[in-house]
Image (spheres, rainbow, N blue to C red):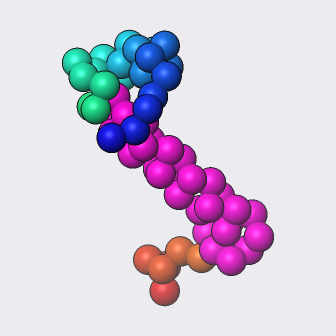
C-alpha cells in the first residue's frame, strides 16, 4: 500500500478515463516506461548507436 495524492490520482483517472485509482496508476506507470524507452531509442539514433540509413531489404 502506498500513499498517493488524491488530487493527482483523480487527475490521472480523468486523463486516462480510468474507473479506479489502481487502473490510473498502472496506466501512468506503463506510459512512463514507454516514454523512457522511446527517449532511449531516440538517444541511440542521435548518437549513431542505431543507424536508420541502412535498408536491409535492399541487400
Q: Main secondary structure of the magenta part?
A: helix
User: In which image quadrant can residue 43 be found?
Assistant: bottom right
User: In which image quadrant can residue 53 be found?
Assistant: bottom right
Tell me: 5 left or right of 53: left
Q: Nearer the viewer, residue 34 or 27?
A: 27
Vertical arrangement, residue 16 with respect to residue 3, above or below? above
Residue 34 rendering spot, x and y as whole percentages = 47, 50
Q: Which residues are magenta?
A: 24-52
Identify which residue is drawn at 24% across, 22% down: 20
- Tell me if residue 25 is in the magenta stretch: yes
Q: Residue furthest bottom?
A: 59
Identify which residue is drawn at 77% across, 70% down: 47
Residue 4 rendering spot, x and y as whole percentages = 45, 28
Q: Residue furthest left?
A: 19
Vertical arrangement, residue 53 with respect to residue 26, above or below? below
Q: Nearer the viewer, residue 5 or 17?
A: 5
Vertical arrangement, residue 57 with respect to residue 44, above or below? below
| Residue 31 seen by the camera | yes
Quadrant location, the N terminus: top left
Q: Nearer the viewer, residue 53 or 35?
A: 35
| Residue 53 seen by the camera | no
Residue 10 rendering spot, x and y as whole percentages = 40, 14
Q: Nearer the viewer, residue 27 or 40?
A: 27
- Tell me if residue 29 is in the magenta stretch: yes
**How many numbered marks are there?**
0
Residue 52 rendering spot, x and y as whole percentages = 61, 69
Vertical arrangement, residue 40 with respect to residue 23, above or below? below
Identify which residue is drawn at 39% across, 45% down: 30
Identify which residue is drawn at 74% across, 74% down: 48
Amino acid at each position: 500500500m502506498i500513499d498517493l495524492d488524491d488530487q493527482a490520482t483523480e487527475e490521472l483517472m480523468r486523463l486516462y478515463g480510468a474507473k479506479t485509482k489502481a487502473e490510473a496508476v498502472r496506466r501512468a506507470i506503463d506510459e512512463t516506461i514507454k516514454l523512457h524507452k522511446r527517449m532511449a531509442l531516440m538517444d541511440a539514433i542521435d548518437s549513431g548507436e542505431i543507424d536508420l540509413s541502412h535498408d536491409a531489404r535492399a541487400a
